[in-house]
C-alpha cells in the first residue's frame, strides 16, 4: 500500500488501525515526512493478508473514508499479481541482457510481456526466452506512426516500460500514457552530461568517475525524477571505448535496481523527485 | 522509542494508536520482522510531542499495558537530553580527533563527558576543548586497579563508552557494567584479521581491500555485534605503513557513523547482531 | 613482456635499451620494486613491434643475455595470439553467463575453448555460442577418473582455467598442471568465511558488507594469491537468499576483472601474493 | 622527474639510460601515451640517487641534450626538499582541519607556510600549530588590494596554494602567477552543479549520490583540470544540512588526496585534463 498526503497527526495510527481491523499483519512500514510542521507525508506499508485478491475490493471501499479524511492519494498492490514489463531497446544490448538474465534467475519478480526495438538484431535471442519481439523501425518521418504501432503492441496490460538503452526520444503524448511508468537508463551521472554521447563528454571533461542514472521519463530530456545512480572509477588511461566498457556494467546494475524497486512498489514520485523506500 | 518483542499481529497498530491518543505525531517509524510467522519484531518510532520530558513518566506508565500485552522490551529516549560519551584512547589519536572535530562542528549530537587514556600524550589537546582528560596508566599488574579507577572517573551518568583505538583488552566485569554500550573500532574488515596487527596480517595475505569495523564489545575478542563496516582499495604497492595511512580514514569514518547511530538510538541488539534503523 | 628478478640498478635501462635496439616502441611500462635496497623487482612492458610473431624467436634468443645478467624470470606474450580459456561451472550459472556475455560483447579479449561441468544443465545454452560443452559427472568415487577425463578434454592448448562457481575441490595433481593458471571466484571477502556456505556464515556473523574474491587456486583451500576483491552493502533486512542475490553481481564483476587482467598478462605471482599492473 | 613530450620511439630507453649512466636507480616509472601513432607522451620516474641535491645542477645540464632531442617539457624534483603550501580558507573549516591533521600525523609530506583567510575565526587554532595566519578581509571594493596583499604575504617560496573552501573568486592575474598550482575543492561532482550552493542544487535535482571535486583553478569557474573526485550515497530523507554534513567528509578526503598527489609530483596537466600517476 502506497500513500501520499499532506502531513497531519494520526496518519500512521489510522492506517495501522485500519489494517489491523481488517486482519492484516504489517510486515514492513516506511514513512517519510518532508517536514513535521506541514509539507507532504509518504507511506509504504507491506502487509500480509490471506486471500487478499478476493478481499481487495471490499478493503478499498472501506479505506476511502480514511483516505478522504487525510486527502490521500493511495493504492494497494497485490504482490501475488506480478507487474508486467515492456522493454524497449536499440542496438546496445547489455541492459536488456541483464534484465533477461535477472528475470530468468528469479531475481526480477515480474513478467516480461514483450520487447520492442527499432532494430531487428536481438529478435532470435529474445524469442529464445519465449518473449515476443516487435521490430518497429523508427525514422524521423515515421516517428509518429511508429509510436502508434508501439502503443498497439503494448496493449492495455503493461504496467511499466523500460528504456534499456533505447536511443529514440519519446513524444509527450506517449509519456502522458505512462506518466511515472517509463524508466530510462542514461549513461551519465545526471545532471552532468545531459543529451547525446555522454561518455565522449565525460572523456573531454576529464572526470575521474563515470556514472549512470535511472530516471522516470518526462518531457524534459534526461530531466525526470531520478530513481538510482551509481559510479565507477576511471583514469586518464581510459579512452572513450574503455569508458563505455566500464560504463556498461554500471548501467546494467543501476537499471536493474531501479526496475526491481519499481516492480516492488517501493517508489513514490513527488514533484520532480522520488521517495524510494528500500 | 525502541521496541523488541516476539512478532504478533497488531503491534504497529497498538503502538501508533497509543502515541496518537497521547498527542504525539509520528515523524518516522521503522520496523523489522525477522519472520512474519514467528520470530522477533523490532520497531523504532521517532515522534514529536511538546513537553515530552515532563510527560514522559506518565506516558511510560500508560505504555506498560501495551508492552505487557506483546511482551515488549522497550524504552523511550528524550532527544532533548543528549547522550553522554566517555572516549578511551591509547597512542593513535585519529579516531579521537575525528570525534572531537565532528562534535565541535555540531555533526555529533552528544556530550563528551571525559577522555580516558593509558598515555598522557593527548592531555593538552583534549583539555583545550574543555573536556576532562584522565591519564590512567595500565600495566599487566595494575590492570584491575586501573579498571576500578576508570569506573570511578566515568561515574554514573555516562551513556556510552567509545574505544577510539584503545589498545587494552576490557575485562568481563567492566563489559557487564556497559553491556551493548561499549563501541570499539577494529582496524580490519571483521571477521577477517581478528586480534593484533590486522594491517600486517592484511599485508601478508595480500588482500586488495582493507577495512574497519565498529562493533559492540563482548567477552569474545573482536566478536561482538557489528554496527558498521567499510573498506578502501589497496594494491601490491602499499606496504604496512601505507595500509595504516589509508586505514586511518576508513576507521575514522566508520567509528563516527556507529557513534552517531548509537546516540540517535538507531541500533537494537539481538543475540550477536545489530538492527540498525538508519 | 613480464619480468621478475632480484632488484638491481640498471634493469629498466637494460630492458628499454634492448627493446629500442630491436625497433620496439614502448607503449606502457610498469615496475614495482619491493624494496630498493634488495628484494624483488617486477616489470611489465607493453610494446609495439611490427611482425612480432615472426621476430619473437630471435628476440627471445637475444634477450637471454640480458635475462641472465639480472637472473630474470621472464616471458614475452604476443597479444595478437589471444589466450584460450576453459570454464568450469556447476549449477550456479551467473559467472559463466557474465563471461560469455563479456566475450560476445568483445569486452573479454580471449577465446573460450570449452566449458566443463559436473552438471548437464547449461549444455544447450553454451553450445548456442558455438562452444563445446563437456558434461563430466563427479562423485566421491569417480573423482580421480573425472579429473583425468577433464585433463583430456582440455588438451594441450588451454592457457587458463576459470572456476566460475565450480563447486568441486581440485586435486593437487591437477593444480600442479596449471600452477597460477587456475582462477577461482570465492563468494566471500577472503580471508573471511573460508570454505562452504560463505553467505550463511556472513549472515550468522551479521556483517554489514559482503564480498567476493578472485584468486589463483593453490593446494590450500581458498588460500591462494588474491587477484581482486570487491564488496557490496547489506543490512539486517537481508536474509541468506537476498545476500546471495546481491552477491551474484559482485561475484560476476570481480571474476570478470580478474580474468581480463590475466588474459592481458597484467598479473605476476610472487610467493602467495599478486602484483597486478592495471 | 616529470616529462611531457610528443610521442616518439626511444624515449623510455633514452631516459632510463641517462639515469643509469648517472648512477640513479629507478624505483618507479610510469608512462602514458595518448596514442602510439602520434599524440603526447607523459612520463614520471622516481629514482634514488645519493646526494641528489648537490648533483642536480650537473644532471639538469646533461639532460638538456636528451630533452632537446625529444622536445620535452620536464623537471626534476628533489623529494628531500618538501613542497611549501599556502592554505586559503573562509568560514567552513573542515578541509583546513583535515590538512592540518594529516600534516601533523605525518601523512602529508609538505610544509604549511601560512594560512590566509578573509575571516579571523581560525586564527588561534592555526597559530597553535606554529603556522602564521593572515586575516585579509575581502569586499567587492577591496578585492584588488586584498589580492595584492595576499601575494605579498605568500612571498616567493610557496609551491602550491590550496583553496580549502575559500569562497572568493580568484582573479585571472592571480591565477596566472600560480598556473596549475592552485588546487580548489568544489563541493559537487563536477561538471554537475557548477557555481554557488551546489548542495542546494543537488537537493533540488533529487540526486542519489553527492560528490566533491578537487581541480586546478583556471579562469573558467569550476572548469579547470580535475584531479580527483569521489561521491557518497544520499536519499530522499537527507535535507540540505544533512547533504552538507555527508559532503564534508567527501570534500576532506578528496582534497587531501589531490594535495598529496600534487606534493608528490604525481600530476601532469595537459590541455584541460590531468594525468595522475598514482
Image (cartoon, coloured by chain):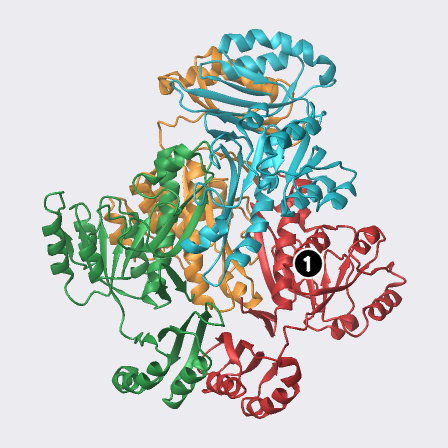
Chain colours: A red, B green, C cyan, D orange
| Residue C131 image offset from top left, x and y in percent | 76, 37
Tell me the residue that label 1 is attached to: A103
| Residue B220 image offset from top left, x and y in percent | 29, 51
Q: Is residue C13 visible?
A: yes
- Above or below, A8 against C169 in this view is below
Q: Quadrant of residue D205?
A: bottom right
Q: Is residue C197 left or right of residue B193?
A: right
- Above or below, D253 against B55 in this view is above
Q: Is residue D38 visible?
A: no
Q: Quadrant of residue D139?
A: bottom left
| Residue A211 image offset from top left, x and y in percent | 60, 52
Residue in front for this viewpoint, D31 or B64 = B64
- Above or below, B261 against A44 in this view is above
Q: Residue at x 66, y 36 (%)?
A: C87
Q: Secondary structure at mark 1?
A: helix
Residue in front for this viewpoint, C278 or D269 = C278
Q: Is residue B193 left or right of residue C242?
A: left
Residue in front for this viewpoint, B66 or B114 = B66
| Residue D249 image offset from top left, x and y in percent | 41, 54
Q: Is residue A270 left or right of residue C80?
A: left
Residue in front for this viewpoint, C138 or C128 = C138
Within 10 Å of disc 1 (Cα), the crowding (few <14, some 14-19, many 20+) is some
Q: Residue furthest front?
A: C141
Chain name for mark 1? A
Amino acid at each position: 500500500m502506497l500513500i501520499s498526503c499532506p502531513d497531519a497527526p494520526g496518519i500512521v495510527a489510522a492506517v495501522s488501525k485500519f489494517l489491523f481491523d481488517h486482519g492484516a499483519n504489517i510486515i514492513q512500514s516506511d514513512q517519510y515526512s518532508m517536514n513535521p510542521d506541514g509539507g507532504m507525508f509518504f507511506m509504504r506499508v507491506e502487509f500480509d493478508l490471506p486471500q487478499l485478491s478476493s478481499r481487495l475490493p471490499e478493503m478499498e471501499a472501506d479505506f476511502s473514508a480514511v483516505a478522504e479524511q487525510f486527502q490521500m492519494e493511495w493504492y494497494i498492490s497485490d504482490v501475488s499479481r506480478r507487474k508486467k514489463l515492456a522493454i524497449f531497446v536499440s542496438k546496445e544490448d547489455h541492459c536488456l541482457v541483464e534484465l533477461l538474465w535477472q528475470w530468468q534467475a528469479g531475481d526480477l519478480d515480474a513478467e516480461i510481456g514483450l520487447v520492442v526495438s527499432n532494430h531487428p538484431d536481438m529478435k532470435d535471442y529474445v524469442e529464445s526466452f519465449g518473449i515476443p519481439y516487435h521490430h518497429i523501425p523508427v525514422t524521423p518521418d515515421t516517428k509518429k506512426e511508429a509510436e502508434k504501432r508501439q502503443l498497439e503492441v503494448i496493449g492495455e496490460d503493461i504496467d511499466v516500460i523500460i528504456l534499456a538503452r533505447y536511443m529514440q526520444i519519446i513524444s509527450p503524448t506517449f509519456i502522458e500514457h505512462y506518466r511515472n511508468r517509463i524508466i530510462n537508463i542514461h549513461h551519465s551521472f545526471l545532471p552532468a552530461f545531459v543529451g547525446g554521447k555522454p561518455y565522449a563528454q565525460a572523456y573531454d571533461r576529464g572526470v575521474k568517475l563515470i556514472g549512470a542514472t535511472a530516471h522516470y521519463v518526462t518531457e524534459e530530456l534526461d530531466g525526470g525524477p531520478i530513481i538510482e545512480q551509481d559510479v565507477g572509477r576511471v583514469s586518464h588511461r581510459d579512452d572513450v571505448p574503455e569508458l563505455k566498457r566500464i560504463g556498461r556494467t554500471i548501467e546494467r546494475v543501476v537499471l536493474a535496481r531501479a526496475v526491481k524497486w519499481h516492480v516492488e512498489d517501493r517508489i513514490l514520485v513527488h514533484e520532480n523527485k522520488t521517495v524510494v523506500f528500500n
